[in-house]
Amino acid sequence: MDLLLDRLRTAGFDAVAAEAAQGGVVALAGLATLRDGSRVFAKTLRADVPDLFEVEAEGLRVLRAMGGVTTPEVLAVTPRLLVLEPLPPRRDDDGRFWEELARAVAHLHTTTQSDRFGWHRDGWLGRLRQDNTWDTDGHAFLARRRILRWLPEPRVEAAFDAAERRALERLCAALPDLLPPRPPVLTHGDLWRENILSGRTGGPALIDPAVSYSWAEADLSMLWCSPRPPASDRFFEVYADAAGLDGGWRDRLPLFHLRELLSSIAHDDHAAECAEAVREIVAPFA
């Protein structure tokens, strides 16, 4: 953690100790104690990625300002360092916590409708670029910017043969028949369990966004398709009441989750397991 401490001190934080955070595939992160006894959460990069932290800080501010979502306060951001207000862990086993999260995400999705999919700048998913090029066609946006965008990545190229790649392309061509049209809304973009914490008052707070105007169900897919506690079932029940979910949503969410599976392969994160999941989803198009 010496690198993190050095960069905190360079940025004007009198840090005396740091405890490494668990998880994450990109940054060196930890909870730092300052000389006055206060604490901050900070992360840095071993290799420079010029705008990664700037994009993340913007995403946190946008979610709070436009969507009313609780996010940690940004205390400092530089090309090499992001310093945030520290937050408590989420309450995994508390159904009311997941109900509050559902209402917050439903509010985000129902109050931020746009006329275009995308964002004014590209973002980051892990250590790789998220292509946010504007598009008025949601099916084309999902296909080109969220699914097919990953095929040229070296580890993804190596994971699938030509027939499997063609099956994925045929699935993308069929998206207009598989997904009913929906308007673009502001999305967190990486809404899995580890990016959910508690705010200072105990309610849910979100971290590590990859924001864009996208499909609301793209956010839901991250939570539904990744490991989560049983109490989180309440999220989907309450979200459906607050925002509405058409029949068949459980069958649609794996299509949106293709982006996360392909990204995980590209990052070499449980790559073999994710490749098998992709093959299962595209099997009807083989």
Image: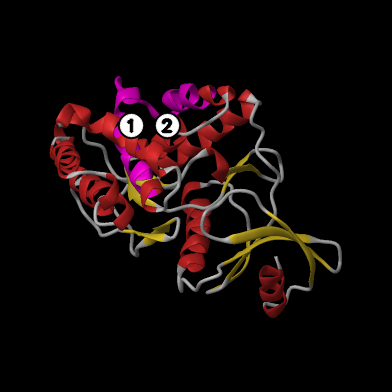
User: Can residue 256 be found in the magenta stretch?
Assistant: yes
Q: Is residue 196 left or right of residue 181?
A: right
- Does residue 153 lie above or below 102 as drawn? below
Residue lying farthest right? 36
| 68 or 36, nearer to the observer | 36
- Disc 2 marks a residue whose amino acid type is Cys
Residue at the image position 86 percent from the left and 62 percent from the top: 37
Residue 176 badge = none
The image quarter containing residue 40 is bottom right
Q: Amino acid at mark 1?
A: Pro
Residue at mark 2: 225
Q: Position of residue 75 (x, y in %)?
A: 65, 66
| Residue farthest bottom in this picture | 10
19 shown above or below 286: below
15 left or right of 28 in image: right
Which of the two discs, 2 and 1, labels the residue nearer the N terminus? 2
Q: Which residue is mark 1?
A: 254
Quarter placement of the C terminus = top left
Give the dominant element type of the magenta stretch: helix, strand or loop: helix
Coordinates of residue 191 in the picture (x, y in percent):
47, 42
Q: Which residues are magenta?
A: 234-263
